[in-house]
Amino acid sequence: MTIRTNPSLGPSLDTVLAPGDAWFDVAGNVSPLYGDVAFDGSGYKRVWATSAAALTAGAAIAIDNSGNATASTGGAYTAPIAVPAGGSFWAQAAAI
């Protein structure tokens, strides 16, 4: 699923969810699936991901096909803000 969004359409793409939280829960519609894609207002690709380990803001990360993010010096994505272990977030592509 690909969507184009900005904060006027819902929560900011820089929002980090704690384990167990949902992005949206309106009439049974819950969080995006891990691996879903969005584009922010600046044109950066975002991927909905989760991380087993805490990530620091700006950390380079790699994302597997299941949406699992891991710190990786050669990763093509970054954590837009700090992410706690088990957190869900919209990882940002390092380049447009």
Image (cartoon, grey):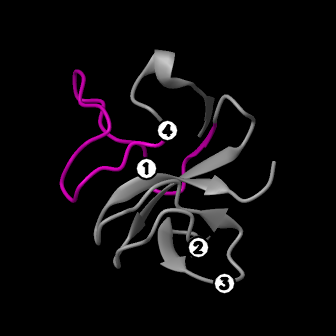
Precedes in sequence: disc 1 or disc 2: 1
Q: Which residue is mark 2?
A: 61
Identify whether 67 is placed above or below 36.
Answer: below
Indicate the amino acid at tag 3: Thr
- Callouts 4 and 2 close, C-beta under 8 Å: no
Alpha carbon separation for disc pair 4 and 1: 15 Å
What is the x, y in percent for residue 53?
A: 35, 79
Q: Amino acid at mark 2?
A: Ile
CA–CA distance between discs 4 and 2?
17 Å
Residue positioned 52% across, 61% down in the render:
79
Q: Please name the residue that numbered disc 3 is placed on.
A: 73
Percent position (x, y) of residue 89? 43, 53
Looking at the rendered structure, the kind of residue marked 1 is Leu
Q: Secondary structure at mark 2?
A: strand
- 22 lies above or below 73: above
**Main secondary structure of the magenta stretch:** loop
Q: CA distance from mark 3 to mark 1?
A: 25 Å
Residue 61 or 32: which is nearer the viewer?
A: 61
Magenta-colored span: 14-39
Question: Dot 1, how many residues are within 10 Å of its Cα: few (below 14), some (14-19), or many (20+)?
Answer: few
Mark 4 sits on what residue? Answer: 13
Q: Which mark is residue 33?
A: 1
